[in-house]
């Protein structure tokens, strides 16, 4: 249903978002964006529908990130060290997690982003990214680090402090890129390199309920940042700005393979493959039977039929994911 080429998708993304970005596009004088902005108008969605699309994107981005880790565990890539849970390689299950992860990102999240008009001009995308990094750098991770220290979760405090510093560097790189994009002065910085963290099956390494809750918020934030930057990178590539595409892709890699993964270790997000399948089944069933049908009903009620259709179709996809995972689990018994 949502299978379409990246190019077609991006064209529709631009079309949907162009009107809301028109002022920015004109201010920064990016001819391609300007033309798109003048050509199309974004359909207005109700605030409630936009909020539900935003929740959907968060969930889809998170599912993509988690399934990547579950795939690695099933592949037997994540080395089980002393004191960790031990699992045996399950390559077919790894493949199932990877394929499902692609659907969550390339179809579900992309479709929700297109409806919500998340992607704008390169300049608008950079501004959005700078805002997100600023919040994480100045507010979120500092608060989380302070809380973890108070509650004696020192490992978490250390990780949050390190990530806060990374986000500050991301913001600086994006600011430099924004100057280059809008004024032509200077160059787009080279992309950061991710220090890839492997996430073996293991138990949570934090004690306080508050640290656990903050870790969960942070994990969702990192997954969403990764997904957003992936969309922004595709947009930059489409406009011919390869250096900006690389900067977004490199930063997306840090959010996923370093920040999300580092937090996943502390949260004990990965279990044995059987446990991971059970976790996935529960999540997919909730989306299929409660979350997306509820969103669809609401979108229909407020008069957003395109969004309602998306929520209904996605609910059907999630039901298929749940049965595929259930089948895989049955075969492991
Ligand atoms: Fe999904
Ligand atoms: Fe970042
Ligand atoms: Fe991050
Ligand atoms: Fe799913």
Image (spheres, grey):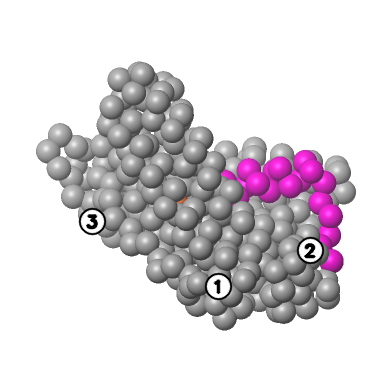
Task: Please say if 242 is above or below 264.
Answer: below
| Residue at 35%, 18% in the rendered image | 151
At 70% from the left edge and 69% from the top edge, which residue is drawn?
A: 28
Task: Name the residue beneath numbered marker 1.
Answer: 185
Q: Secondary structure at mark 1?
A: loop
How busy is the neighbourhood of tag 3: few (under 14 within 10 Å), some, or many (20 plus)? some
Whether residue 110 is visible: no
Q: Which residues are magenta?
A: 41-58
Task: Give whichever of discs 3 and 2 has the lower sequence position.
Answer: 2
Instruction: Mark 2 and ligand 2: say if the CB distance to the nearest ligand atom is below 8 Å.
Output: no
Respond yes or no on whether mark 1 lies under 8 Å from ligand 2. no
Residue 36 position in % (x across, y down): 76, 75
Question: Circle 2 — which element?
Answer: helix
Sooner in the amino-acid sequence: mark 1 or mark 2: 2
Residue annotated with mark 3: 77
Q: Give the CA separation, mark 1 to mark 2.
A: 21 Å
Q: Nearer the viewer, residue 61 or 154?
A: 154
């Amino acid at each position: 249903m949502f299978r379409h080429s990246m190019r077609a998708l991006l064209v529709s993304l631009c079309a949907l978002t162009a009107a809301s970005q028109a002022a920015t596009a004109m201010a920064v004088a990016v001819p391609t964006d300007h033309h798109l902005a003048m050509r199309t108008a974004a359909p207005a969605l109700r605030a409630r529908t936009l909020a539900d699309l935003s929740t959907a994107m968060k969930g889809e981005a998170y599912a993509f990130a988690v399934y990547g880790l579950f795939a690695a565990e099933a592949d037997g890539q994540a080395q089980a060290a002393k004191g960790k849970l031990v699992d045996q390689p399950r390559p077919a299950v790894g493949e199932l997690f990877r394929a499902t992860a692609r659907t969550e990102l390339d179809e579900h999240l992309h479709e929700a982003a297109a409806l919500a008009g998340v992607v704008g001009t390169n300049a608008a995308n950079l501004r959005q990214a700078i805002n997100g990094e600023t919040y994480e750098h100045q507010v979120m991770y500092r608060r989380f680090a302070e809380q973890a220290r108070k509650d004696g979760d020192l490992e978490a405090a250390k990780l949050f402090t390190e990530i806060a510093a990374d986000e500050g560097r991301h913001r600086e790189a994006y600011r430099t890129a924004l100057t280059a994009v809008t004024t032509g002065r200077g160059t787009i910085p080279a992309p950061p390199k991710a220090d890839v963290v492997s996430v073996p099956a293991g138990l949570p390494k934090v004690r306080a309920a508050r640290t656990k809750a903050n870790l969960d918020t942070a994990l969702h934030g990192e997954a969403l940042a990764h997904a957003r930057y992936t969309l922004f990178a595709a947009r930059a590539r489409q406009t011919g700005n390869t250096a900006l595409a690389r900067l977004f892709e490199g930063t997306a890699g840090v959010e996923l393979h370093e920040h999300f993964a580092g937090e996943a270790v502390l949260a004990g997000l990965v279990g044995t493959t059987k446990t991971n399948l059970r976790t996935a089944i529960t999540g997919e069933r909730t989306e299929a039977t409660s979350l997306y049908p509820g969103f669809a009903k609401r979108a229909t009620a407020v008069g957003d039929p395109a969004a309602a259709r998306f929520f209904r179709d996605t609910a059907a996809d999630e039901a298929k994911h749940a049965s595929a995972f259930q089948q895989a689990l049955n075969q492991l018994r």
